[in-house]
Image (cartoon, grey):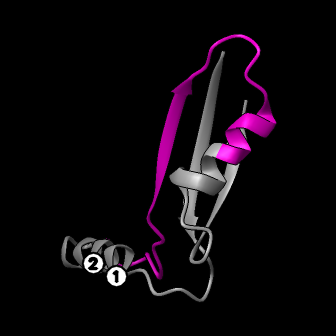
Amino acid sequence: MKAKVTVMLKSGVLDPQGEAVRHALGALGFDGVEGVRQGKLIELDLASGTTQADVTAMCERLLANTVIESYSIEM
């Protein structure tokens, strides 16, 4: 079984990498981009019997800094 975890900075937290991407896109002539938020996608290959609760625990303990990041899980 696979799980996909998407981790993003919470709204209100500054995203300097996203801002750098937005600026670079503008420099390349893509003027229609008003904002960029950059995150990470983590794909997990799970053993049978691993539950969504297990993946949630992984996120809470390691994969996301829950003070400044939010996450979503797709099993």
Disc 1 marks a residue whose amino acid type is Pro
Q: Is residue 7 above or below residue 34?
A: above
Q: Determine whether the residue tagged by mark 2 lies in a helix, strand or loop.
A: helix
**Residue visible at 47% across and 82% down in the picture:** 34
Image coordinates of residue 36 in percent, x first then y, are 45, 73
- For marks 2 and 1, give the one nearer the viewer: 1
Query: Do the numbered discs 2 and 1 sit on residues whose CB atoms are within 8 Å?
Result: yes
Disc 2 marks a residue whose amino acid type is Ala
Quarter of the image with the C terminus in it: top right
Which sits in the foreground, 31 or 37? 37
Q: Quadrant of residue 55?
A: top right
**Residue visible at 69% across and 51% down in the picture:** 72
Which sits in the foreground, 40 or 52? 52
Q: Quadrant of residue 74?
A: top right
**Residue visible at 62% across and 68% down in the picture:** 66
Residue 43 sits inside the magenta stretch: yes
Identify the residue under disc 1: 16
Image coordinates of residue 63 in percent, x first then y, are 52, 51
Image coordinates of residue 28 in percent, x first then y, are 20, 70
Task: Say few, some or many: other residues with alpha carbon within 10 Å of mark 1 (under 14 / 14 to 19 / 20 or more).
Answer: few
Identify the residue under disc 2: 20
What is the C-alpha distance between the residues marked 2 and 1?
Answer: 6 Å
Which sits in the foreground, 58 or 41? 58
Q: Determine whether the residue tagged by mark 1 lies in a helix, strand or loop.
A: helix
Magenta highlight range? 30-57
